[in-house]
Amino acid sequence: MAADSGPSPKVTRAADIPAGAARFVLVRHGETDYNKLGRWQGAGSDPPLNPTGFDQARAIAGELEGWRVDALYTSPQQRARQTATVIADRLGIAPQVIDDLREMDHGLWEGKTKEEILARWAAENEAFEVDPVHVRRPGGDSYSDLAARVWPALEALAGRHRGEQVVLVTHGGPIRLVLSRVLGRPLTERQAFGVENGTLFAVEESGGDWRRSQIQGSR
């Protein structure tokens, strides 16, 4: 298969996972009204899925049905748990909550639109966009803060699930963090990664190396 420049919302059938590897299917939760209205929602916001979000969750569950799934984990936030519950009902596997899969904290920007943020925090927003790894949102997180909890959690799960395929229901921030590493692209390009509500991405860890999972099965 030819290499491509961006992530693909496809996962592989799991029979080919090497014994020493762990494969993760990263799922972004379905839409909420905050998503629909363009309001920032992070660790400090907990809106539920809206009807479109539940439709997206059912579509994800249908996409995963028939694939091997050895475990299902979810962020504790309501939008992720509701998405995971829909998946769990379809697959017949109980979701387990991992707090470190929660979204990054947007601090004072929680619940605000981009227009509201630019009107009050234009300089802070520009600084964050130039260096999202190290610059914190006012009262919130940087991507380094997010990485400090997400990577240890993923590494622990990788050690627990050798030779298995695991579904993780989480948020845009953690997924973009992972894709930045496996794609070799900076987080300043994160909006180009295609991490929309109701999308999923496959990555694999082996021997401390994280990479995109190869597509070996066919739909």
Image: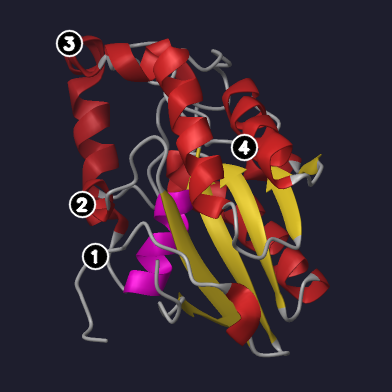
Q: Between marks 4 and 1, how big is the CA–CA gap?
A: 24 Å
Q: Mark 1 points at which residue?
A: 6
Q: Residue 192 carries which label?
A: 2
Question: x%, y% of residue 210?
Answer: 52, 78
Q: Which mark is residue 102?
A: 4
Marker count (numbered): 4
| Mark closer to the observer (4, 3) | 4
- Mark 3 lies on a secondary structure that is helix
Whether tag 2 and tag 3 are in contact, CB under 8 A, the answer is no
- Mark 2 lies on a secondary structure that is helix
Using a 10 Å C-alpha cutoff, classify the residue at mark 4 as few (fewer than 14 neighbours), some (14 to 19) or many (20 or more).
Answer: many
Chain part drawn in magenta: 175-183
Q: Picture quarter containing residue 68? A: bottom right
**Which color scheme did the rendering employ for the protein?**
secondary structure
Which quadrant is the N terminus positioned in? bottom left
Q: Which amino acid, mark 2?
A: Ala
Left or right: where does residue 26 sit relative to residue 95?
Answer: left
Look at 31% across and 63% down and name the residue there.
7
Q: Which of the marked residues, 1 or 3, is nearer the chain's N terminus?
A: 1
Q: Which of 60 and 47 is in front in this view?
A: 60
Question: x%, y% of residue 12?
Answer: 49, 71
Q: Which of the marked residues, 4 or 1, is nearer the chain's N terminus?
A: 1
Whether tag 4 and tag 1 are in contact, CB under 8 A, the answer is no
Q: Which of the marked residues, 2 or 3, is nearer the chain's N terminus?
A: 3
Q: Nearer the viewer, residue 179 or 188?
A: 179
Q: Residue 119 carries which label?
A: 3
Q: Which amino acid, mark 1?
A: Gly
